[in-house]
Amino acid sequence: MQVDEDEIYWRHRKEDEELEWSHDSTRLIAQLTQCFSTAMVGSRSWIGGFFHRTNTKQNDKFVDYPLTPLEEERLQRLQERLDVPYDETSLDHQESLRALWNCAFPNVTLKGLISEQWKDMGWQGANPSTDFRGCGIISLENLLFFARKYPASFHRLLLKKDGDRATWEYPFAAAGINISFMLIQMLDLCSEGKPRCLPGMNFVKLLGEDEDAFDDLYCIAFEMVDAQWLAMHASYMNFNVFLLSLS
């Protein structure tokens, strides 16, 4: 599926599904989408072209740019979040994980933080803490933000309600962790100081308008990844190949 077809698909999907964006955040959501939409130009698929930028090197001709005190403060706070690993002994982290379960399956009692039940959400094993090794607590925070702010969209993706689905679908939680990681790379948020790539530069300006900009961008990216999955007619056996196609 080429760029134009993907754009049509996404436009129709936004019209058909209520994504629950609040009125006062609509403009920011549009800006967040535009923040990386310029990376989608080319012969690759829409989302593939977007994530193709995740592996690009920092701009060798980087020109320094000023940040307002608020932008600098929020960027530093976000980068500090990225450095926090998931700690299965932390009561706060345990509570966040339980909260995610309650958002996902409010009518199902969780038997424990180590339970086969977690596989129903798309964790790779009975202990979700092992899945966080590649990204840290930010990926759990992203999932929880999505579940709390846009619950209908969250459940629609979790339960795979859209489109012609395969018998064996992609693991929801594992995909979510990968999306967090890819966004961090694409926006060059792990660099010391300011991002040195154009998407990252644009993102920091939006972060100055809304401290939740990264979390909102994550929700948009998850929707796009799901749309690309459907467009590729992929199944669970294609999951690793699918992730590679996004990078």
Image (spheres, helix red, strand yellow):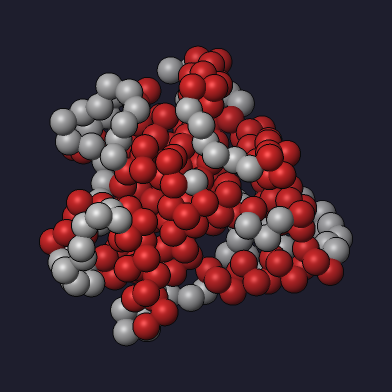
Q: Nearer the viewer, residue 24 or 134?
A: 24
Q: Quadrant of residue 114?
A: bottom left
Q: Quadrant of residue 124?
A: bottom left
Relative height, residue 220 to residue 118 (above, below): above
Residue 220, given in percent of the width and then of the height, sits at 53, 41
Quadrant position of the C terminus in the picture: top left
The residue depicted at 84 percent of the width and 57 percent of the height is: 65
Q: Is residue 179 left or right of residue 108?
A: right
Relative height, residue 225 to residue 60 (above, below): above
The residue depicted at 59 percent of the width and 40 percent of the height is: 21
Q: Nearer the viewer, residue 157 or 51?
A: 157
Residue 155, given in percent of the width and then of the height, sits at 36, 43
Give the number of marks.
Answer: 0
Q: Is residue 8 left or right of residue 62?
A: left
Observer able to see residue 62 = no
Residue 8, given in percent of the width and then of the height, sits at 53, 16
Residue 18, given in percent of the width and then of the height, sits at 51, 31
Quadrant position of the N terminus in the picture: top left
The residue depicted at 61 percent of the width and 61 percent of the height is: 189
Q: Quadrant of residue 204?
A: bottom right
Observer able to see residue 15 = yes
